[in-house]
Amino acid sequence: MPLSPRVPDLRALDLLLSVARLGSLGRAAAEHGITQPAAGSRIRHLENLVGQPLIERSALGSRLTTEGALVADWAREVVGAANSLDAGLDALRTRTEGRIRLGASLTVSEYLAPHWLLALRARRPDAAISLRAVNSSEVARLVLEGEVDLGFLEGPELPDGLEARTIARDELVLVVGPSSAWVGRRRAMTIDELLGLRLVAREPGSGTGHALDTALADHGRLAEPVVELSSMTAIKAAVEDGVGPAVLSSLAVAGEIALGRLRRIEVDGMQIRRELRAVWPSGRRHSPVLRDVLAVATERSPDGDDED
């Protein structure tokens, strides 16, 4: 059955994901090597196909609407599949043995991996690299079952059968929308107050959710979330719109905090630092291409280790 003519162009979907990640249509246009008017035209065409506005523009930049966040959720899997197809076709064209399959948690894939892949393209132009974005528990499964060659996940626990290397360090922070009653309060939130909040949460199996539950285990259980979402973009949009607060990676919210779209709230007694790690099957030797992947990931990530 042929595709519907209403299916958007892949380049437009990829551009929408860049706007979500960078918070700016201009920066997204620069990343894609096109002018801002051309990027705006591409987004307008996408909005016409969908029949809904997908981006809100302001003096602070660009953010996705609720409908835009939903489209970005669906687009992420489509663009990921297209990248895998491109990598496979590239491998056929070049007859290279440098095809590398990576799996990464959503935090890593959205906020660190794009920089790695650009650097790897310069270092290994003949390598065909594909990336699957899933939650941390799924990354471990993919590595153990041989579906990816190297994984990147969050959290302190390492499943049996895997070796690991720290490539970055991160902190979880509580964020609220700019109109939240917590903004401007002089005192920090207490742990008990945090436990009573209904958060906008990640889906079960995420490294962020596991790290938060582990850190608060001695204090009690969190209230039921107001909603669970699988995309960082959708969570941030929900928090900004006042649906509820969220505990997220500092890497993921740095841009929104700088622009005032999200506000960080200090929680007295809560400091959740975690490691983002590369994982591979125990005892396996790395190929030259995999060694380059690890080197680039460490060099271009905050607080990465320098040791193998």
Image (cartoon, rainbow, N blue to C red):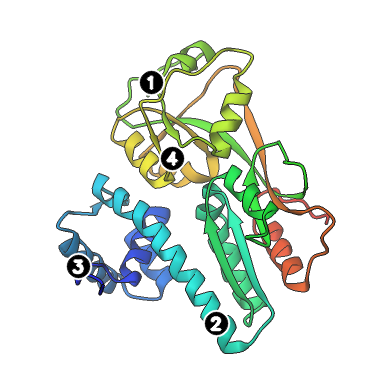
Q: Which mark is residue 257?
A: 4
Amino acid type, mark 4: Ile
Q: Which residue is mark 3?
A: 6
How far is the residue under mark 4 from the one under mark 2? 39 Å
Q: Find residue 7 and report its horizontal and vertical position in percent.
A: 25, 67
Left-right relation of 251 to 37: right
Amino acid type, mark 2: Asp
Who comes first in sequence, dot 3 or dot 2?
Answer: 3
Question: Is residue 153 visible from the viewing direction of this image?
Answer: yes
Q: Residues within 10 Å of mark 3 (few under 14, many from 20)?
A: few
Residue 171 is drawn in which quadrant?
Answer: top right
Who comes first in sequence, dot 3 or dot 1?
Answer: 3
Amino acid type, mark 3: Arg
Q: Residues within 10 Å of mark 4 (few under 14, many from 20)?
A: some
Q: Which mark is residue 90?
A: 2
Front of the two marks 3 and 1: 3
Q: Which residue is mark 1?
A: 182
Q: Quadrant of the C terminus?
A: bottom right
How far is the residue under mark 3 from the one under mark 2? 28 Å
How far is the residue under mark 1 from the one under mark 4? 15 Å
Q: Find residue 11 and report its horizontal and vertical position in percent.
A: 34, 71
Q: Find residue 119 and report its horizontal and vertical position in percent.
A: 61, 70
How far is the residue under mark 2 from the one under mark 1? 51 Å
Q: Which mark is residue 208?
A: none
Amino acid type, mark 1: Trp
